[in-house]
Image (cartoon, rainbow, N blue to C red):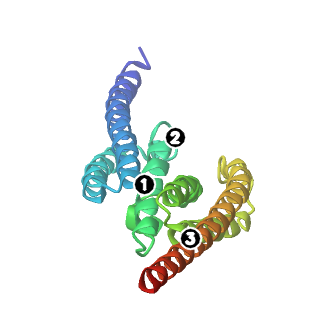
Amino acid sequence: MKFEGIMEEIALSLKAKDAKREEIITQSREIIRRSGSAVLSIHRGEFEAAEESLKAAREALEGALQACMDFHEFYYTGPLPQAFQEYAEAMILLALVKDREVPKPAELRIPPEPYLTGVADAAGELRRYALDSIRKDSINEAWRALELMEEAYTLLKAIDYPRAVVPNLRRKVDVMRRLVEETRGDVTLAHQGLLIRRSIEKASAGMEGQRDVNGSGKGEGA
C-alpha cells in the first residue's frame, strides 16, 4: 500500500502525543488541587502550609511544561491553561496578603493570558480576606485588601482585548467591579461601626470613672 509507511509514522506520533496529553492532564489536576489547597491555607492564616502546597504545585507545573516541549499546542489548549490560572491566583494572593512583591508571569513560567485571569481571581479572594479581617476587627487590613482590589480592577479594566486574545477576562472584570463595590460598602460600614463602638466604650469608661469618683467622695464625707 502506498500509505502504509506514512500511516505507521503518523500512528507513532499520535501515540506519543496522547501519552503526553495524559501526563499533562495528571499534572494539571495536581496543580489545580495544590493551588486550591494553598488558597484555603492562606485564608486560615496557615502560610507554611500554603508554601508547601505551592511548592508541590510548582513541581507539577515543571512536569507539565516538560511534557509540552514536543507538543506546544498543549500549552494553550486542554486543562493546562486552567492550571496556569489557578497557580497564578494562589501565588499572587499569597504575595498580596503577605505584602510581598507580586511575581511576574515569566517568574511563574506561565503565559500572560492566564496570569491576567489569575490576577482577577486573586482580587476576588481578597474580598474574602477583607471580610475575615472585619470579623477580627482588623479594619486597617480590610482597607488594605480593598485598596489592592481596586488597584487590580483599575489595571485589568484598562486591558481591552477581545475574548479570543484573553478568554474570560472581560467577564471576570465585570464581576470584580461588583465585588469591589460590595467590599467597599462592607468595609465602610464595619469601620463606622467600630468607631461607634469605641465611642460608646469610651463614654461608658468615663461614666464608670465618674461613678468611682463620686462614690469615694461620699465615703470620705461620711
Q: Nearer the viewer, mark 2 or mark 1?
A: 1
Q: Foreground: 29 or 148?
A: 148
Which residue: 70% across, 49% down?
175
- Marks 2 and 1 in Cβ contact (< 8 Å): no
**On-image quarter of the N terminus:** top left
Which residue: 37% across, 28% down?
18
Q: Amino acid at mark 3?
A: Ser
Q: Position of residue 192 (x, y in %)?
A: 67, 67
Dot label at residue 72 = none
Dot label at residue 204 = 3
Q: Pointer 2: what residue? A: 77
Q: Secondary structure at mark 2?
A: loop
Q: Nearer the viewer, mark 1 or mark 3?
A: 3
Task: Give the class, few, some or many, for how many residues have Cα within 10 Å of label 2's Cα (few <14, many ≥20).
Answer: few
Q: Is residue 83 left or right of residue 188?
A: left
Which residue: 43% across, 80% down?
219
Which one is earlier in the sequence, the residue at label 2 or at label 1? Answer: 2
Which one is earlier in the sequence, the residue at label 1 or at label 3? Answer: 1
Q: Amino acid at mark 1?
A: Ala
- Marks 3 and 2 in Cβ contact (< 8 Å): no
Quadrant hosting residue 185: bottom right
Task: Tell me if residue 176 can be seen.
Answer: yes
Quadrant hosting residue 9: top left
Q: Is residue 46 left or right of residue 162?
A: left
Task: Tell me if residue 73 can be seen.
Answer: no
- Marks 1 and 3 in Cβ contact (< 8 Å): no
**From mark 1 to mark 3, how far is it between C-alphas?**
45 Å
Q: Pointer 1: what residue? A: 90
